[in-house]
Image (cartoon, rainbow, N blue to C red):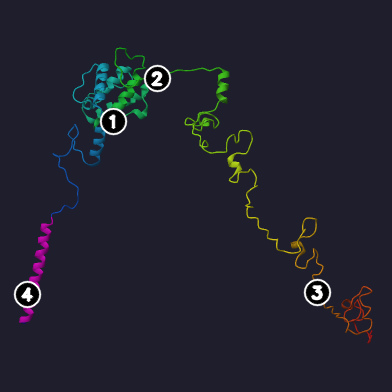
Amino acid sequence: TTKRGSLAAEAHTTMTDTSWTTKTAAAQDTRPVSSAVHTGYDAAEKTEDGIPLYGMDKELAAKAAAKRDPKKEQEARGWIEALTGMSLDGTLQEALKSGIVLCALASAIKPGVCKKASTMAMPFKQMENISNFLDACTKLGVGKHDLFQTVNLYENKDMNSVLLTLEALGRVASKMPDYKQEWPTFGAKLADKSVRHFDNETLAKGKAAQTFIGRGSTGQANQSGMVDTSRNIGKMDHVKGVEKLGGDGSVTAVGMGSHGHASQAGTVDTSRNIGKMDKVKGVEGFGKDGTATAVGMGSHGHASQAGTFDTSKDIDKMKNVKGDGVDELGKEGISAINLGSTGLASQSGMYDTSKDID
């Protein structure tokens, strides 16, 4: 019992120590879970309206701020004030946010092109004024790709796009008949229309002329001018023996090859002329007067098959064959082999007819 009690006390002490060690290590580990840092409202970046910016909104606002051109905003402010006769207070975004100034600008360029602006301070009414201004810009000839979105101005998302729309409107407005000469211009000037007329002869020449694609980078319809000859380097100036080659129809150095001839003459080395048939007897004059050469004569020494069979041992294989008429066989045209076992050259005698049974 005493032993059991001591073991239990020891185990309890060990568990207690382990739990205390784990809690102490957890309390000492103060490392952050991630590298993200939370920014409170006071420390966060804000728009001109005091709206805090976080995450993607912050990045987009930074890109828009980098594109912002204060000089262009000042020019736009002066242009709007000159056409409307209104004084803009605060920043350009604050002055245009309600849409009232924009509607007045469109009506000044062309009276009646824009609906009357609402003076109510409710957000949806102000956004409606901005939308009416954008519709008026379309009627005046501004492209849809040059128009900003309502939220870009009202929420100050992208003032650069607002300036681009005002520039496009300024280009179109300068061509309007109601545009006064004392008004300043804003944006690039539109090019004047220039219509050109050509006679039939000029049009016919134009159809037969080479296109820019057909001419290529050299400016010609052929390959002339493709080689740069401004640095005329004679690569063959130091090569001897090639003077006038190719100029009078003669073979060039490339055509002559390494052996110096336009043909294969000289390609075989005859400096070591070894006569392989000098020590062969009996071949003098072969092949020169129409006779058969040593190769054509073969091993038997003839140009035909004469002598290819050994007849030194003439063995008559039919001398010991006995029988009537054997000596005369083959002389009348039928051989012993053709007669067969019946002794005849036909099938007669092959059947037994001694017992003729009807």
Label 4 vs 1, first from the N-terminus = 4
- Say which mark, if any, is on residue 9: 4
Label 4 close to label 3 by CB (< 8 Å): no
Label 2 vs 1, first from the N-terminus = 1
Query: What amino acid is labelled 1 in the image?
Result: Thr
In percent of width and height, residue 84 lies at 26, 17
- Tell me, yes or no, whether the highlighted magenta stretch contains residue 10: yes
Mark 4, other Cα within 10 Å: few <14 / some 14–19 / many ≥20: few
- Tell me, yes or no, whether the highlighted magenta stretch contains residue 163: no
Decide which of 303, 117 is in the foreground and name it.
303
Decide which of 29, 211 is in the foreground and name it.
211
Q: Which residue is mark 1?
A: 150
Label 4 vs 3, first from the N-terminus = 4
Distance of label 4 from label 1 (alpha carbons): 77 Å
Q: Which residue is mark 2?
A: 191
Q: Is residue 219 left or right of residue 30?
A: right
Q: Is residue 290 left or right of residue 198?
A: right
Decide which of 200, 234 is in the foreground and name it.
234
Query: What amino acid is labelled 2 in the image?
Result: Ala
User: Which residue sits at x=10%, y=65%?
Assistant: 19
Q: Which residue is mark 3?
A: 310
Q: Is residue 354 left or right of residue 101?
A: right
The span picked out in magenta is 2-29
Element at badge 1?
helix
